Amino acid sequence: MDEQQGRPTRVLLVDDDALVRAGLRMILSSAEDIEVVGEAENGAQALEGVAAHRPDIVLMDVRMPVMDGLTAAKAITERPQAPSVVMLTTFDLDEYVFQALQAGATGFLLKDTPPRELVSAVRVVAAGEAMLSPTVTRRLVGHYAADTVNPRRREAAERLRLLTDREREVLGAVGRGLSNAEIGRELFMSEATVKTHVSRLLTKLEAHNRVQVAIVAHDAGLLDA
């Protein structure tokens, strides 16, 4: 349930394959704290669905007719009070998914994700955290930034000049895919203090979410050790 509003997490499913949507609906509807409020078969319908249903989370395929998931993700995340967008893909390293993360998507899920992990991922996103594991985070941001290291590194280093030493430590931990609780244990801070630092990082780095913060950490070379 949404702790502040006392209601289930509202999810919009977007995929051009009706069988995929049916499977996702069946899995998510089995959880009492998750409600599937609508479906769409392309990005254009997803935009209409977001306006009509006001979901908390949009689970959206990358490759669809009419309007692809990348274009739709950008349009959705630019809206005021935008829902979290999680991309669905058949491939674990899809360049379109990386672009979607840069555009503001919260993360991505493989379509063959086990049911229990799918439900857990939705809950994690609903709680305001990135749902990429440390391994996936490193692979994703590393794979697609490799051929543009120098210009990206200079830009990221410039952005880091705005941060305090403590914020840099938190940035590095976020970049490694750690949760707030894990960061707190590692840096000897309360979880509330970690949340404050993460909020400041989002503001200072002009990032939409933790995944974009992780990308900055990678570009700046904080994960090179």
Image (cartoon, helix red, strand yellow):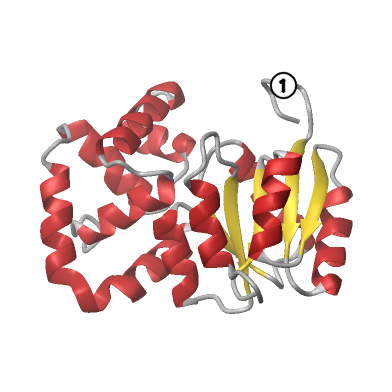
Instruction: Tally the marks.
Output: 1
Corner quadrant of residue 166: top left
Residue shown at the point (75%, 57%) measured from the top left: 13
Coordinates of residue 194 in the picture (x, y in percent): 38, 29
Residue 78 shows in this picture: yes
Q: Is residue 174 above or below residue 91?
A: above
- Look at the picture and state if 136 lies above or below 190: below
Label 1 crowd bin: few (<14), some (14–19), many (20+), radius 10 Å: few
Q: Position of residue 170 (x, y in %)?
A: 30, 39
Q: Position of residue 37 (x, y in %)?
A: 81, 45
Residue that appears at 76% across and 41% down: 53
In the picture of the structure, the residue carrying the numbered disc 1 is: 5
- In depth, the one of 68 and 194 nearer the eye is 68
On screen, residue 54 versus residue 202, left or right, reads right
Element assignment for label 1 = loop
The type of residue carrying mark 1 is Gln
Relative to 37, is 91 above or below? below
* Quarter of the rendering containing residue 101: bottom left
